[in-house]
Amino acid sequence: MGTKRLYYDEPALRQFDAQVLSCKPFTATASAPCHAQGAWAATLDQTAFYPTSGGQPNDLGKLGDADVLDVLDEGEEIVHVLDRPIPLGPVRGVIDWPRRFDHMQQHTGQHLLSAILQARFNLPTVSFHLGAAVSTIDLRGPEPDANLLEQAERAANEIIFENRLVAIRCGTAEELARLGVRKQVDRQGVLRAIQIQDVDLQPCGGTHVAATGEIGMLLIRRCAKIRQDWRVEFLCGARAERAARADRAVVRSAAESLKCADDDVSESVKRAAAEREALFKSLRSTTERLAEAEARLALQEIAPAENGTRIVARVLEGVEPVYLAKFATHIAQTAGTVALLARKECGHLAFAQHPSVGKDMSALLKNVLEKLGGKGGGTRDFARGGLSRVEDAQAAVELATSLFKE
């Protein structure tokens, strides 16, 4: 006989009475996910709980005293996964209405958006996903640019504000095709379809609002390339409201930081980014010149060893991270020189040599890190890494100097 699906005809039903036909320990199968140990599976003669299907997640709520953890479509039967057993016989089911209504808003919004994108811009929807935070549709065709998406969003909201009727229609695939179904399906028998007045007709077993006004509003967030298709993220109803409020807070905060009007944030950000890039280039150039000058001074202060090698062994403090490598590189540009450097603030190491020295900086770094702990690597002439303990910076330079001289 199977489970009677009340949500097909009464998607706004929040509570219902039913008969519990079976309740047994839940057993995971290939088609059903695993749940916490101790879950139970119950079947009813009828239910208003929607199972995960067609891109729409399942409902949650309560059956008697039990929490509904999941709802599974097992062909003719709907299986309710519960946190505890319930007795056979009569039971009251209560739907988690905020969750259900949110799903209804997103799903009907998807039908509306997909219909507009296909009818006006020849971009058919090939898949739909209703996520916990955002919903997505995948479009097939040329890239929908920002202007196109804005037009589609505006058209969808105009229809939402007109509060057009959303009705349930039933008929065979042939009958629905004659009525102008958006996407034909290859199924036999009587099909259930959702009709948005003068906009869309689409076979669907999901739950939907009664009129477009209940969608609230629709907000397109972004579009990205996904394999051969274009994935559009969108929000409806309360989700769109929360996102708009969050966006507003971000703009207000940015305006305060940039000391400009809200409407000027975009241009101010562009100017700030350009100034930042210019300062970064200037700093990089200045750091390069400083490293080169200080490398010359360092080499002038150190007398060569008997074999002619000069070792610059230092723990640097108060310099930018990038300076360490640049300083080491400039030191090693002079024949017979070696740089064994560490940065005090982070424990980073940089070992470099002029090729004429003939040692192996990568092997030297490996030996130091094996004794003091850390990670790193490099080439024969240049190696860098990081100590496990920042406070070992001085010890690392002293150890490297000792090992090098050996």
Image (cartoon, helix red, strand yellow):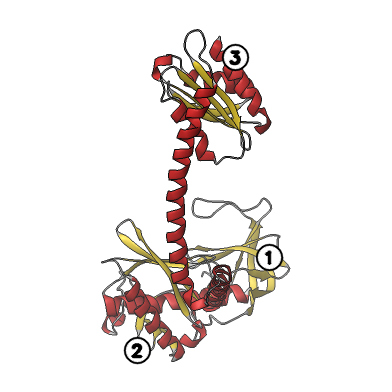
Residue at 65% x, 74% y is: 93
Nearer the observer: mark 1 or 3; the answer is 3
In which image quadrant can residue 83 be found?
A: bottom right
Q: Mark 3 points at which residue?
A: 402
Residues at circles 1 and 3 in contact by the CB criterion of under 8 Å: no
The amino acid pointed to by label 3 is Ser
Whole-Å distance between the Cαs marked 2 and 3? 84 Å
Q: Which of marks 1 and 3 is nearer the N terminus?
A: 1
Q: Which of 159 and 343 is in front in this view?
A: 343
Q: Which of 114 and 189 is in front in this view?
A: 114
Nearer the observer: mark 2 or 3; the answer is 3
156 lies left or right of 186: right
Query: Does the image show residue 190?
Result: no
Query: Does the image show residue 381?
Result: yes
Residues at circles 1 and 2 in contact by the CB criterion of under 8 Å: no
Count the marks.
3
Q: Residue 67 carries which label?
A: 1
Residues at circles 2 and 3 in contact by the CB criterion of under 8 Å: no
Q: State the residue lying farthest toward the right.
A: 65
Q: Mark 2 points at which residue?
A: 198
Q: Which of 27 and 210 is in front in this view?
A: 210
Whole-Å distance between the Cαs marked 1 and 2? 40 Å
Q: Is mark 1 on a helix, strand or loop?
A: strand
Mark 3: few/some/many CA within 10 Å (<14, 14-19, 20+): few
Q: What element carries label 2?
A: loop
> Residue 16 placed where, x, y %?
63, 79
The amino acid pointed to by label 2 is Asp
Mark 2: few/some/many CA within 10 Å (<14, 14-19, 20+): few
The amino acid pointed to by label 1 is Asp
